[in-house]
Image (cartoon, coloured by chain):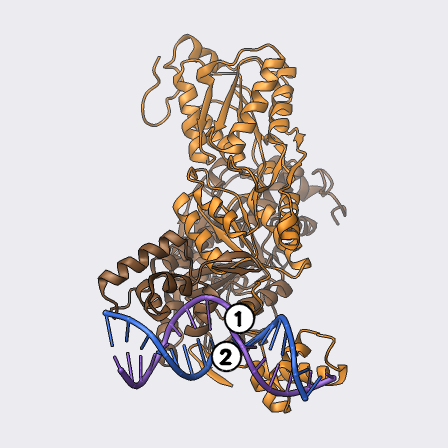
Chain colours: A brown, B orange, C blue, D purple
Amino acid sequence: MKKTRTGFQVTLNDIAKKLHVSKVTVSKALRGHPDISSETAEKIKATARALGYSPNFMARNLSSRRTNAIGVIVPKIAHHFFSSVIEGIYDTAFQNGYEVLLTVSQENAERELQHINSLLSMRVDGLIISVSEQTRDYSIFKKIKEMGVPLTFMDRVPPLEGFNTVVADDRGGARAATEHILNLGYTKIAHLGGHQYTSIGRERWRGFADAMKHHGITVRKDWIVYGGFSEAEGYKGFKMLYETGKLPEVVFAVTFPVALGVYRAVREMGMKIPDDIDIICFGNSGMNHLMSPSMSYVDQPTYDLGRRALEVTLENIQKKGNFLPQHITLPTKLVLCDTCTKKRARGKSTRLLLKNGRRIKPLLGKAPKS
Amino acid sequence: MKKTRTGFQVTLNDIAKKLHVSKVTVSKALRGHPDISSETAEKIKATARALGYSPNFMARNLSSRRTNAIGVIVPKIAHHFFSSVIEGIYDTAFQNGYEVLLTVSQENAERELQHINSLLSMRVDGLIISVSEQTRDYSIFKKIKEMGVPLTFMDRVPPLEGFNTVVADDRGGARAATEHILNLGYTKIAHLGGHQYTSIGRERWRGFADAMKHHGITVRKDWIVYGGFSEAEGYKGFKMLYETGKLPEVVFAVTFPVALGVYRAVREMGMKIPDDIDIICFGNSGMNHLMSPSMSYVDQPTYDLGRRALEVTLENIQKKGNFLPQHITLPTKLVLCDTCTKKRARGKSTRLLLKNGRRIKPLLGKAPKS
DNA sequence: GTGAAAGCGCTAACAA
DNA sequence: TTGTTAGCGCTTTCAC
């Protein structure tokens, strides 16, 4: 027993001495190495348990040169999307005997970089990253590739070659949602989109544009607003729509939180969803069914995104040199709830706005332009 | 440059050789040790950067016997409460040069134990744990104490002596909420509480009972339901209330998710909150203001819970032997939203129930008793 | 089936 | 100011 900075820790040697064997024997026994007779192995395991032995991860990994750990970086954890993805990652990792080192960038590129460096210095065997909405400097990823550390981008993918990617069918899903609202008869459609330097922002916009084009409807420029993925951004985005002086009939929001921001803004203005303005979004939350009205949305295979991301990363770790980057796209599904079930006659308040921009209770901050 | 299992990793030695100095010099220089002249230090740092050196956490921590890492275990991350706590932990850790190793137990005692063991084997300098709602075996915590690893319980605290605790004022907050509804004139009050072997379940129940007693109102036994902290449990709990044949005027829910379960159940039965039944709860979610009606609740200092938990843990790490366990209780605040703002005349549907238990649309599953 | 030797990359103590 | 020596606790040859 050794007194460490942290107190008393049992080591292999303690067990070895107690049993008058070498520490190598103990090491092998504990790892189930076939060298050791089942008899001694049992004895060793028993005393290890009795002594409360817990292997020193640092030492083990320093000598074996592998950590059996995967580093994960996500931008947020408060959202259903990521927490479900993480569940998929955890479960799969555990089944494969891997440890997960989870970190959160808070949509902050600087913090993301810190985490990457920490995880690299912990020598994780592989990385799964969903980049922050701010990330624009990709040099660290190139460095990671040079270092030979397997890296899988999940959901949010930077424009780089040579990495594994696991994403939902953003373009297809966005297109399906847009087709749906077009089929309802809506033509005045706005898109609260993500920044175009983000993969999901770009792909979802493309899906939207695909459908619009296919129906021969021109996209009104000031009804396309690009921004971040948070509720605050959705609120801000709707305000910008409002300031165009003309409200669309329906909004397609790039994420669930963005749609929430719209809800809040709409409510503050004294308007009603879906009667005054309708809405549909990409992604979901566990609380959707409690909102009134509940939102129709594009469902993402969250758990599977996590699971597949981990699987690909593991495969990459195992095959190493002779492994070609994999690109996995999982299907999405349109789920209809209370919104966007039929075309609504525009409500009173919205009509008023069209005649006279001042009749609707203005949002906090700047008054509407027109 | 060494080829490791993971690829190429630059070591201290690489830098040392390149500069014709010893690796000790490099090590010291990189850590800003005053031994080294600023001239050589600069040179060393420059080549380290050029070579893309990243210190090996394992090796560093193995020899220094400290990891500068805090292990954190929370039961859930999908909830506003924990994700905000985690933010507090992260920020404070970063300010103090500490790493956070975050894990999630999913309210599962077994998984919690796995995580504890992993973190211990990573030799974290300290632990912050919010125990799962299932945890009933506390032996591991005693073992941790024997090992001398500083441990702080946050929010959910097992009944053990000798550990740091950082909690919200559960009892006081629950009492304040209950006082409030009593002052509105309600007397038929139900409590959807947490299991009594959990600290927050117990304390919140006590606060509730305090207020009831203070107002001289006897607590109807079958209006006290104990369960878990999830939405599903809230749903189930309300069903049990319903089966008593008499619905209370108002429900005090032990957590926000539990209250959500009530919302869902109430809605399914075709009743209305707050007119048919009113509700208030402990804790909040970022989405509360989007629900209709928005819920009045006891606000917890989530970020600060995280911050203080980390601070106490660090202090414990530093003082080690001569450190007495600290117990910190942070104040809560009653926040009034749409529910519980005044006593409502009981709605039609509820009155019907009182005469004839069959008039309200029954919940899925077993039909109501009466 | 078992164990001695060597070393993973780093830091701490001490010498030079 | 710099370098030498000796580990940290473990795993990996490779000899017995």
Rendered view: A117 above or below B14: above
Where is residue D13, by image quadrant? bottom left
Where is residue A48, by image quadrant? bottom left
Secondary structure at numbered mark 1: helix
Residue B179 position in % (x across, y down):
64, 19
Residue that carries the numbered disc 1 in the rendered image = A120
Whether discs 1 and 2 lie on one chain: the answer is yes
Secondary structure at numbered mark 2: helix
Q: Nearer the viewer, residue B336 or A259?
A: B336
Dot 2 surroundings within 10 Å: few (below 14), some, or many (20 or more)? some
Q: Which of B12 and A270 is in front in this view?
A: B12
Res A147 label = 2
Residue B112 position in % (x across, y down):
44, 47
Where is residue A24, by image quadrant? bottom left
Residue depicted at 39% across the width and 15% down the height: B359
Residue A353 position in % (x across, y down):
67, 42
Structural distance between the alpha carbons of marks 1 and 2:
10 Å
Residue B346 position in % (x across, y down):
53, 14
Rendered view: A333 above or below B52: above
Q: Pointer 1 and pointer 2: residues touching (CB < 8 Å)?
A: yes
Residue depicted at 40% across the width and 15% down the height: B244
Three-letter amino acid code at disc 2? Met
Horizontal side of residue B115 vs A359, given as left or right? left
Dot 1 surroundings within 10 Å: few (below 14), some, or many (20 or more)? many
Question: What chain is tagged by disc 2?
Answer: A
Rendered view: B290 above or below A158: above
Three-letter amino acid code at disc 1? Leu
Rendered view: B341 above or below A313: above
